[in-house]
Amino acid sequence: MGSRTALVEDLMERFPHVPREAVFKEDLLRGGVAFDASALSDNEKGEVKPKSYFIFSFDHGTLPELGEAALRRPPEEIILTGGPYDLRRTVVSVRVNPSSPYRVAADEEGLLGLYLDGRRIADVGVPPMPEYYRHTLANGKSVMEVAPTIQWGYLIYLTVFRVCQYFGAKEECQYCDINHNWRQHKAAGRPYTGVKDVEEVLEALEIIDRYDTQKASTAYTLTGGAITSKVAGRDEADFYGHYAKAIEERFPGRWIGKVVAQALPKDDVQRFKDYGVQIYHPNFEVWDRRLFELYCPGKERYVGRDEWHRRILDSADVFGARNVIPNFVAGVEMAEPFGFTTVDEAIASTTEGLRFFMSHGITPRFTTWCPEPTTPLGKANPQGAPLEYHIRLLEAYRATMDDFGLSSPPGYGPPGPGRAVFSVSSFMDSLPARETTEGTTEEPARA
């Protein structure tokens, strides 16, 4: 292919059942996007909601390598519409890459657009600064630091433990930069609280609830690094669970409560449920046995792949299969030096995993791999996985769901192109638009 445009158009022609919006979205997520100065935010003092770095960096460079984008943060997300491909409203998480062929810039009239190979291919909307970001906690901390929102305001992302106890080359997941992201923010002098105080979380949620008058925020996710011993005297289930308990006691029924944690024994999973969590995400990361052992050495050492999967299935007895939604990192299957060398092999392996879980009524979801440069796999694979892999995965994902009669999982907002708000992969954009279990067919507020 002579240009990125030619590659994208070829894939849209070869896979017509995959929404064209998803093709562009996956390419932006896997390879990042550059920002002209005209498209950067004025951080928390501006009119645009800035990128919060809510858990990982999701960038293709370290902060010192991002230039002005490290000083004036880019927006948290962008919305693509219109252009020569007549794109429907598409929410995309921002992953900065100064060398990307995609660039966001303002035209002569000051209107933002997405440019590819020098051609404007879409209008760009940016999230307005929410009113709740303009207020601080009593101790001066910002709401964005304690309880940032993503997915166009749908999800409150509570990373209550900013580091992971799987530490070092022999334990850290080989694609994950959570520990580095913590270090780089501290080195840059940015506020980045390691363990968030439960009272601070509740105070931030009170501010969100007070000023989110349209009730755009519908769910919260409790997450952070794996806990192999204890944090603040609590094991993993009790540590993450006690936040849920406090939130549900203070705000009963206000949000859908979700927790991302390791695959824990059934008794621990029951504690999550007892604390008020509604959806459990015990992420399985990558399906292939050899790659799991190589790329998730800490999880293999402390739990093991087979036991991890058994615990996922057991958790369906506690939460119900539909409310167990394990994530995998789409694309690491093809990471050198150990990954699959052809798209066919990678898709076959991942589809095997999808069929395993979906045959039990469990619907996984996925995050599009961003090869962050401080991780072993990011260093070895700066281009990530081929775009064709990501497009074929969307096709295989929908087909497998259809085979088992499953629909879009709860807690992710509306499905369908032009309606989805889940921003770190296109799986919701690629599913049919239908009434969700959350009882809405409406789009969230536009920019």
Image (cartoon, grey):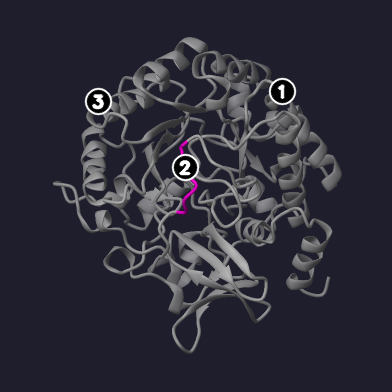
Query: As shown in the figure, which amino acid type bears the numbered disc 3?
Result: Glu
The disc, 1 or 2, on the residue closer to the chain's N-terminal end is 2
- Hey, what amino acid is under mark 1? Ser
Which percent across, then down, holds residue 101?
65, 72
Which of 310/56 is in front?
310
Q: Earlier in the sequence, mark 1 or mark 3?
A: 3
Residue segment shown in magenta: 438-443
Q: Which of 107 and 97 is in front in this view?
A: 107
Q: Mark 2 points at which residue?
A: 179
Residue 27 magenta-highlighted: no
Q: Which residue is drawn at 38% across and 49% down?
A: 149
Q: Give the Cα distance between marks 2 and 3.
A: 31 Å
Residues at badges 1 and 2 in contact (C-beta under 8 Å)?
no
Residue at numbered disc 3: 249
Q: Which residue lies furthest to the left in this view?
A: 138
Instruction: Mark 1 and mark 3 in contact? Answer it, CB < 8 Å.
Output: no
Q: State which quadrant residue 114 falls in.
A: bottom right
| Residue 333 placement (x, y as % from top left) | 73, 41
User: For this rendering, which residue is in front, 320 or 234?
Assistant: 320
Numbered disc in front, either 1 or 2: 1
Q: In this view, does 212 lie to the left or right of 271?
A: left
Q: Which SS class for mark 1?
A: loop
